[in-house]
Amino acid sequence: MSIATAEIGRPRRGRLYIVIGAILAVLAFATAAGLASLPLLQTSTSGTRVVVAKNNISARTKIQASDLQLSAINPAPPQAFLELKEVVGKGARVDIPAGLPVTANLITTSGDLLSSSDVAYLPIPSGYVAVTVPTGEQVGVGGYVQVGDRITMLATINTSIFGATPVSVVRTVFRDVDVIRVGPASTQSTAQVTSSLTLLMTGCDSEYLFWLLNNAVLKYTLESFTDYAATPTQPDPSCPKLSSAGGVGPKEVDKRWHFTTG
């Protein structure tokens, strides 16, 4: 081989080495990028493991660990939980179908929303009592009254019971009455129209209520949740003790609600 031919071959081999080196560099970069993005690809494919209902969970029941499992959801819904312990022991606000993510808006920490079989006692603050009143479809807003709702009570009464000229009068007698149970203790579902409501009120108001139950016709209206007052946690200053109730009759009832003078 002549010197001229050898000189021509060296640049060609050099260019070949450069091309091969560039290809190897591109392959190395692509491999590194692929390895770096692998966790992200796995997450986007499998989703985030969140708490879901393992079986159907009924409304107003306490959620057990056996009702839950972790499942990969992509994308994870807002207000989802990542650990079972965050949900166990809470109450279901509504029916939660199996497989549905359990989110914060579906559960509550309040015992007021649990069925009576899930708590040892009714949520009655000091100085208050639970009173059960009859209800029905037309009396109790078609059965829409549920645990945790607030109702207003109206009384229709003939004023002759007060010794006045007989006339039928309607008065709103109680507002913002807290419903703490619907139906008897054995009822597990409030889906059907029930026969009774258990209400929270002071011992003094309960005397007035029983007088009205015996002498008037009571019906209920359902209040908007935006108008609910805070659930009482302390005794009512107007009736701080159960012993504060001193008995009522027509005179006290008429004085309070003015059936004969309104």
Image (spheres, rainbow, N blue to C red):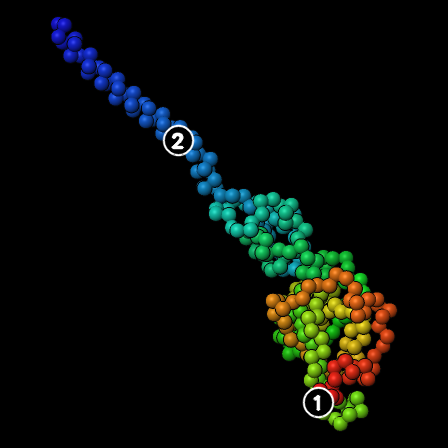
The N terminus sits in image quarter: top left
* Residue 30 higher or lower than 211, as above or below: above
| The quadrant where residue 157 appears | bottom right
Q: Is residue 149 visible?
A: no
Q: Nearer the viewer, residue 142 or 19?
A: 19
Task: Please give left or right for residue 99 compared with residue 4 in the image.
Answer: right
- Residue at (47%, 35%) from the top-left corner? 39
- Residue that numbered label 1 is attached to: 168
Q: Nearer the viewer, residue 99 or 127?
A: 127
Classify mark 2: helix, strand or loop: helix
Q: Nearer the viewer, residue 159 or 145?
A: 159
Say whether disc 2 or disc 1 marks the residue closer to the N-terminus: 2
Q: Residue furthest top?
A: 2
* Residue 255 higher or lower than 49, as above or below: below
Q: Position of residue 200 (x, y in %)?
A: 74, 68
Q: Nearer the viewer, residue 37 or 167?
A: 167
Q: Given contact means CB atoms under 8 Å apart, are the residues at marks 2 and 1 in contact?
A: no
Q: Residues within 10 Å of mark 1 (few under 14, many from 20)?
A: few
Distance from disc 2 to disc 1, alpha carbons, whole Å, reads 85 Å
Q: Residues within 10 Å of mark 2 (few under 14, many from 20)?
A: few
- Residue at (70%, 82%) from the top-left corner? 171
Q: Position of residue 104 (x, y in %)?
A: 59, 53
Type of amino acid under label 1: Ser
Res 33 label: 2
Please give the count of numbered marks on the rendered protein. 2
- Residue at (36%, 27%) from the top-left corner? 29
Q: Is residue 213 visible?
A: yes
Type of amino acid under label 2: Ala
| The quadrant where residue 203 appears | bottom right
- Residue at (36%, 29%) from the top-left corner? 30
Task: Please give left or right for residue 32 compared with residue 156 in the image.
Answer: left
